[in-house]
Image (cartoon, rainbow, N blue to C red):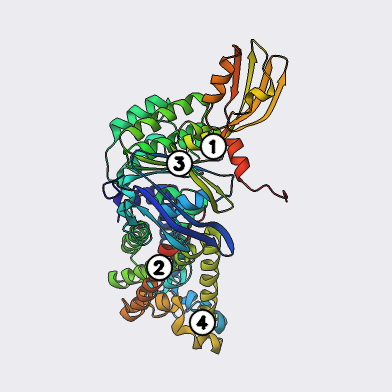
Amino acid sequence: MNIDKQEVAVEFRNLTKFYGKSLGVQDLSFAVQPGEVFGFLGPNGAGKTTAMRALMGLITPTSGQAFVFGVDVTNAAPEYRADIGYLPGVFDAYKNMTGKEFLDFVANMRGVDCSEYVADLTARFDLDLSRQISTLSKGNRQKLGVIQAFMHKPRVLILDEPTSGLDPLVQHEFEKLLAESKDRGAAIVLSSHVLSEVEHLADRVAILHKGQLQLVEHISVLKQQAVRTIEVSLIRKATESDFDYIPGIDDLRIFENRVTCNLTGEVTKFLELITTFGVESIHTYEPSLEDIFLSLIPQEGAR
Amino acid sequence: MKTRLILKTVKDRWRSITLWCVGLVALGAVQLSVYPTVRDAAEGMNQFIEAFPDAFKAIFRMEDYVSGPGYLGTELFSLTLPLIFLTVGSSWGAAATAEDEENGTADLLLALPLSRFKIWISKNLALAGVLVTMGTIIYVVLRVGSLLVDMSIDSIPLLAGVVSCMFLGYFFSSLAGAIGAAMGRKSAALGVSIAVAISSFVFYSLAPLVDTFDAILPFNPFEWAIGGKPLVNGFIWIDLAKLVVFSAALNIVAVRLFMKRDIRI
């Protein structure tokens, strides 16, 4: 991999933020490439919002830096934000404006004209822009927040809990929009405390807990490392000793023709073996990020 | 500065600005309509005022009530107009940045590719525009009205009086703005600013009677605005300069605080 050619869109370098004595985030480091969707995970209060707001220049880091395309955001000229679409965790718009007035205002302040794309997005999200924002439901306000973040086709998207308040149909549309943005090379950081929603959106994830980074990993790797439960019904009976040489097998149980076990990593050897007995049915239970997540976070009072 | 933000700031307060302006017109008209009666009864009025306790006359700086400048000075420029301008100024200053933080819109506004300095300047210009508009209205009402009721007051001293009130309003908006920028809380900014205004006014009013208050008079914004009797003496540049310099200083403090501050969610 040629490091020189690979431009980094967003980077945190040992970012630390204390609010007085209470910790927001500590020693956070990771980088996001263009065209990458980066999931930022952790329970509420883990420090996700702190990191994102530091990147937007809304708060000043206690130490460390945040970069957008190589620009250290602390003391940077505000123009670095021109290429960022930001959706705050709690999105509040000017309630006395209509949706159209609001989007016009934001576009004007950004010095861009994106009326065409706004019309497209508005149609896709089925949002009535003529209504005053104070009369919009939470879900519709969130749609407006999503539109204002995407409307200028920024190269960086910072989305703090973007799907909160969106119903499943709209979430699906949002996922399509995210995929399109990824395809045109945008670097996307999105946070969530609902892990399942990031699972199929993100390329990589960072897990944050109490301000500390627990890990940064590719989703595929995470899943590979994870233990999956497999349940098969065989045509001919097998015995426990048949499974002795299967790597990563654990918790094997055989009852009549039914075999259940936990398997870590690759399943090829296991499948080869069971086909020799004839397979009637097979069920595997994909590990959710939830499980991975819970195994990583030190449990309160566990020791 | 950002024109759209200036217009938005004004538009957000459109209703209250309109009410203040209508109020100013009504106030000016009512005060002037009574003036012919006061003037016609000049002799009796002077005797009547002569009989007021000296302390009372001193507090309202009532040396002469029936002349044009004396009448307007007592009725409008010693309390009512300064109070109106400083109220408008304080509430705007308090809201300038704190409002966005309290409404939760700061994360959106300050994440735009726009410096906090520009945002500050834009909001300041919006306020300046409103103060000038209000000043123009009261000036025109009093100028035209004084001609109609045949009140003798020169245009320059009248202008000086109005301008002083405008700068007093701007001073208190800067004070409220600095507190709001430091704390991000509108109510705190407004409260402190109004408290300072009221105590300044009390110190100013009682200065002729209380030596301590008299001693601190050179540091009193009311003294800078109306102490030199602009309605009689015209522009007192040194006093206006004090208002401008202190307003500027407060604004510099405010901007510096605002630029560095962690924005609350």
**Discs 1, 2: same chain:** no
What type is the residue that disc 4 sits on? Ala
Q: Is residue B6 left or right of residue A210?
A: left
Q: Is residue A224 left or right of residue A260?
A: left
What type is the residue that disc 1 sits on? Gln
Between disc 3 and disc 4, the foreground one is: 3
Residue receiving disc 4: B58
| Residue drawn at (65%, 11%) of the image | A236
Gap in angstroms between the C-alphas marked 1 and 4: 87 Å
Image quarter of residue A256: top right
Gap in angstroms between the C-alphas marked 3 and 4: 48 Å
Between disc 2 and disc 4, the foreground one is: 2
Q: Is residue A263 left or right of residue A14?
A: right
State the image coordinates of residue A248 (x, y, percent, origin top left). Answer: 59, 33
Label of residue A225 in the image? 1
Whether tag 3 and tag 1 are in contact, CB under 8 A, the answer is no
Q: Secondary structure at mark 1?
A: helix
